[in-house]
Image: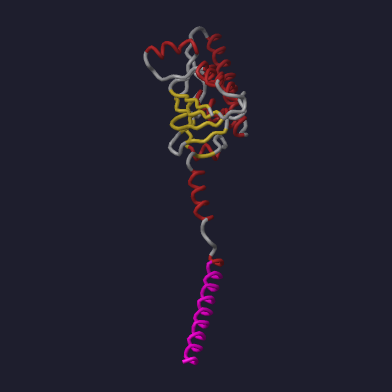
Amino acid sequence: MVRIDIRGPIIPNDYKDVYDYFQMESTAPIDIRKALEKASDIEPIDVYIDSGGGEIHSGSDIYTDLMNHQNVNIYVVGLAASAASVIAMAGHLEMSPTAMMMIHNVSTVTGGDYREMDKASRTLQAANKSMASAYVRKSGMSEAEALKMMDEETWITAQRAVELKLADGIMFEEEKQSLVAAYNSGMLSLKKIEETKAKINAKKEKTVMEQEKINLLKLRRL
């Protein structure tokens, strides 16, 4: 099993040395690629996410690398927002009960005349659809539903993510269910208890009766 941590901003490979210089937590596609190189095609990959997102193309790069692996388990332990929420769609996803996911529209900074602004708008709308495809593929929701949630900058709890089928489960719940199941499986049914008690009582009565017979025989011999 290979563990991968996705924490801090999602950044391009070229920015990694700058973030490292300032000792700032960050995740670049090269980090994920290096980790995946250590794993076989069928070896489980456990990915832990706590990131506010970042550059969408880097997020898409990481998403694609994880999707290319056969056995990926993803755990959102804090926040999976923006580009990080897209990455979270790349495998079997569980969220901590206290974690959140946030999805929103792609944004940019640009300048120029109205033609440049129109072009930027078209580019952003196309980028939104690209990002929405990850949510659609994971949950089965329509593109229109995904885009609406992005328009509204939607914050999603773990329970709501499961309801929307963006997440497959909530961390620790299965453990609790297993404990309950193990506990219950160790208990006899009420019917079985009553039947066994009846047998035990009958055996005790038989033993008492046999002992009384023995005592009577002893008295007769006297």
State whether residue 158 is above or below residue 120.
Answer: below
Q: Is residue 210 magenta?
A: yes
Pick the front one: 221 or 2: 221
Q: Is residue 38 magenta?
A: no
Residue 174 x, y percent position in the rendering: 51, 44
Residue range highlighted in magenta = 193-222
Residue 94 x, y percent position in the rendering: 52, 36
Residue 186 x, y percent position in the rendering: 52, 56
Give the overall secondary structure of the magenta segment: helix
Tell me how many marks there are. 0
Query: If the image is split into quadrants, where does the N terminus sit?
Result: top right
State whether residue 215 is above or below residue 105.
Answer: below
Residue 145 x, y percent position in the rendering: 58, 32
Q: Residue at x 41, y 20 (%)?
A: 25
Q: How is colour applied across the structure in the image?
A: secondary structure
> Taking 53 as reference, is 23 left or right?
left
State whether residue 109 is above or below residue 69.
Answer: above
Q: Residue at x 52, y 82 (%)?
A: 210
Pick the front one: 171 or 120: 171
Pick the front one: 129 or 23: 23
Q: Residue at x 41, y 14 (%)?
A: 20
Residue 37's quadrant in the figure?
Answer: top right
State whether residue 199 is above or below residue 128.
Answer: below
Q: Residue furthest top?
A: 112
Q: Residue at x 53, y 79 (%)?
A: 206
Q: Residue furthest left?
A: 22
Q: Residue furthest front?
A: 222
